[in-house]
């Protein structure tokens, strides 16, 4: 299987990416998608993806970094982000998604107004690139990794009104209720679960996980955060732990690990084009 969402650019993995990937491979996790958080971080993510055959990357600005100015941004352009870098990264074959992008209402900062503005700017940029045609990026079908924390009411209408196809969105690290999972599924998107879904205390997330159709579910670690059982509390969480989450969630869903494994691989291949 592939860990569809981790952050190999974070300090936890400096000088440890090779051994981390070796450990993952021994656990049956044969590759990773390292997810971008800023217009500068996406360049580092691409560099890691280029250096490792079984690593791919994404291109986007995380809502919790929406107020983190890219030091290369010119105040004259009126934005803190260098959107062109997203295009540079997305046009490389090792980039398999936009994001992660979205809204996070869990923390008081960045202010909601800033998160909203950056989300709108970013979606507009992505759509302009997607519509660039044969002379443009040439990969109009890149999926979009969504970060949505306690923000379904704000985010769903924005995504619905965008021209991006619903079936190309994945709501990563789902921490909502069963009713919120139903909203995401009715919209048409996929839902991805981290180690949180293995915690007995996360009863709502586990109930939501059990109701997601087999062809709409994904597995990830969000490493270096959120280790699944039996590694809860360790730092860093590592891509190898995706196998623990997959085993736990197969049992939760009442299916064999083999069939669940086959299904998540098929879903990863359909959405991200990697297997
Ligand atoms: Zn993440």
Image (cartoon, rainbow, N blue to C red):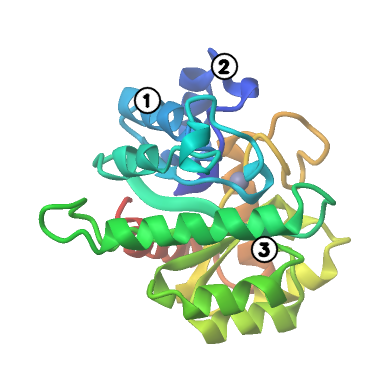
| Image spot of residue 39 (x, y percent) | 48, 37
Left or right, residue 114 beside residue 49: right
Quick check: 182 above or below 96?
Answer: below
Res. 66 image quadrant: top right
Residue at x 57% of width, y 72% of height: 255
User: Which of the two discs, 3 and 2, labels the residue nearer the N terminus?
Assistant: 2
Q: Residue furthest left?
A: 134
Nearest to N terminus: mark 1 or mark 3: 1
Q: Secondary structure at mark 3?
A: loop
Position of 265 with respect to 116 (left or right) is left
Q: Is mark 2 within 8 Å of ligand 1?
A: no
What's the distance in space between the residues labelled 3 and 2, CA to CA?
A: 27 Å
Residue under label 3, please give it.
174
> Looking at the image, which residue sits at the far right?
201
Along the line of sight, which residue is nearer the eye, 269 or 68?
A: 68
Return the disc, 1 or 2, that comes first in the chain's sequence. 2
Residue at (39% x, 71% y) in the render: 164
Asked which secondary structure carries label 1, the reply is: helix
Residue mark closest to the camera, 1 vs 3: 1
Q: Which label sits on residue 175?
A: none
The residue pinned by badge 1 equals: 47
Residue at the (66%, 65%) spot, across then down: 251
Label 1 crowd bin: few (<14), some (14–19), many (20+), radius 10 Å: some
């Amino acid at each position: 299987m592939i860990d569809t969402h981790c952050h190999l650019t974070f300090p936890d993995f400096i000088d440890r990416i090779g051994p981390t990937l070796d450990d993952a491979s021994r656990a049956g996790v044969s590759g990773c998608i390292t997810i971008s958080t800023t217009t500068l971080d996406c360049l580092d993510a691409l560099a890691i993806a280029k250096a490792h055959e079984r690593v791919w990357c994404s291109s986007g600005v995380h809502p919790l970094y929406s107020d983190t100015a890219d030091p290369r941004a010119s105040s004259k352009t009126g934005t803190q982000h260098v959107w062109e870098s997203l295009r540079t990264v997305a046009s490389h074959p090792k980039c398999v998604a936009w994001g992660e992008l979205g809204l996070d209402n869990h923390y008081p900062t960045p202010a909601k107004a800033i998160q909203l503005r950056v989300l709108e700017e970013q979606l507009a940029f992505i759509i302009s690139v997607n519509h660039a045609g044969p002379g443009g990026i040439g990969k109009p079908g890149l999926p979009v990794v969504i970060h949505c924390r306690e923000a379904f009411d704000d985010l769903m209408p924005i995504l619905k009104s965008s021209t991006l196809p619903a079936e190309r969105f994945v709501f990563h690290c789902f921490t909502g209720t069963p009713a919120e999972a139903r909203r995401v599924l009715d919209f048409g998107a996929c839902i991805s679960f981290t180690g949180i879904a293995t915690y007995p205390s996360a009863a709502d997330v586990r109930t939501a996980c059990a109701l997601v159709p087999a062809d709409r579910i994904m597995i990830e670690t969000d490493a270096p955060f959120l280790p699944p059982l039996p590694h809860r509390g360790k730092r860093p969480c590592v891509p190898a732990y995706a196998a623990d989450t997959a085993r736990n969630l197969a049992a939760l869903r009442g299916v064999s690990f083999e069939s669940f494994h086959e299904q998540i691989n098929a879903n990863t291949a359909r959405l991200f084009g990697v297997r």
